[in-house]
Amino acid sequence: MNKVLLSIAAVALLMTGCYKDDIDDLNDKYDQLSKEQQAQAQLLAEYSSLLNALNSKLSVTKWEQTDGGYLITLSDGKILTVNQAIESAVELNGEVTFTMSDGSVIRIHKIETIGWYVLSEGTWGSGDSELAYYDAASETFTTKYFNAKNSAALGETGNDLKLYGSKLYAVLSGMNASSGGAVKVIHPKTGVLITTIPVAGDQPRRMATAGGKVYVTLYSGKVAAIDTATLTITDVATLSGTYPEGICAYNNSLYVCNSEQGPGTTISVVDVATFTETATITVPQNPSMIEATTAGDIYFTTADNTWGGGNPSNLHKFNASNPNNITTFDIRATRLATGKNYVYTVDTDWSTMDAVVNRVNLKTGVASAFDVDSEFYLGYAVAADPATGYVYFTDQMGDGVYVFDESGKSKGAYHTTVPNGSSIVFINK
């Protein structure tokens, strides 16, 4: 009897050991499959992010190899971490060629700045607006570039400059509505005038581009649509406000700042398809400049209105999905520019004549002073190079262009010889 009980106990112990071994084996297999599944999911996510970049026609602004893989910065500011999908990368002839882990090859265009233009307003009433051009290959800065290329003056009060497609568009506001302004279309690689689009009886101010059209704000309280194929004004939308300044495009809508030359408190929303004002957004007084991010965040400035008993300049933000929820940053800001990682702003402290420069982190939404390592005065315009991340500032009543990297280190200063640099445009390839 004792032998039987001993045998049963031995079998039970043996079975317990077998169960434990089986469970351990299954746990090991489960862990292995789980890790493989996670790796496949990561690989799929990396392929998907690269595919999205190609479908969105994005370019590479920067790439670097890390211990685990690659960091790829795209032209929309996003940074991809790719640790499994890419075996190797090489840059050649303006492209980055990635050899994938499955042996396939993809090529993404690499953005490179080959030059930049600065448009100067000139002195009001003098008709001395002008373009200057910096050529990156020769490292030369040429002043009075338009005059040299066309043997003619650019015009009166150059307020805005945009590159769209294969053409450069310059807004000349003119002295007043009776004289009218114009949009001049220029070949960006040669500086040669293609045509002049007159704006009779009105003063054009700022531009936005989308869907094959250039949209221009007009001081009479309108927005004009220019067809980029025919280079003619094809339609005009009437706004509920007057003296519109900045304009931006996002998701088939235009957002227009109705300054009213100080007392305005609305941003008009214009539907691109019908080209009519469909809504107005109530905002703080004197909306001035405006830009949209790819995430639908609309940043806008309110210009100084202390001369009219109002508030000093400021920066604000809303999202296109919820335009009535407005965030105010409480920083001095009249002009703004969206860079890869920050929105940069500039203004002037008139008590000291110093330039006031700030920035807002696009990811965290935190505003801070942008500490630059060389001074300039009477801050006026700002631009951000999508290829290098460098930030460019101009000075009001002066002829300077001041360049800094993202850390605030000076990368040089240039002089246009014509005052009031209003816009900077980068020529990339």
Image (cartoon, grey):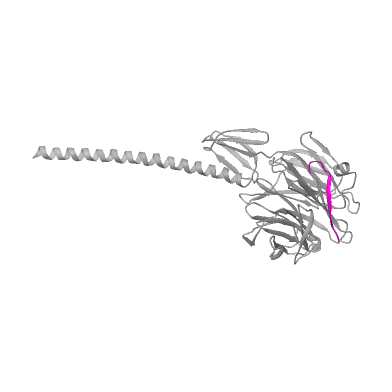
Give the answer, above or below, for where 55 lies relative to 88: below
Outermost bottom residue: 240
Instruction: Determine whether, in the image, residue 374 is placed left or right of residue 147.
Output: left
What x and y, as percent, mark residue 67? Answer: 54, 33
What x and y, as percent, mark residue 22? Answer: 29, 39
Give the answer, above or below, for where 164 lies relative to 264: above
Outermost front residue: 230
Instruction: Determine whether, in the image, residue 418 is placed left or right of residue 293.
Output: right
Going 84% across and 61% down the picture, which residue do you hit? 202
Say whether residue 197 is magenta. Answer: yes
Give the answer, above or below, for where 44 lies relative to 255: above
Taking depth in this image into account, of 299 and 408 the one nearest to the observer is: 299
Specify the quadrant of the image occupied by residue 8: top left
What x and y, as percent, mark residue 44? Answer: 50, 43
Taking depth in this image into account, of 46 and 67 the one nearest to the observer is: 46
Q: Is residue 329 visible?
A: no
What x and y, as percent, mark residue 157? Answer: 85, 53
Magenta region, residue range: 188-200
Specify the quadrant of the image occupied by residue 178: bottom right
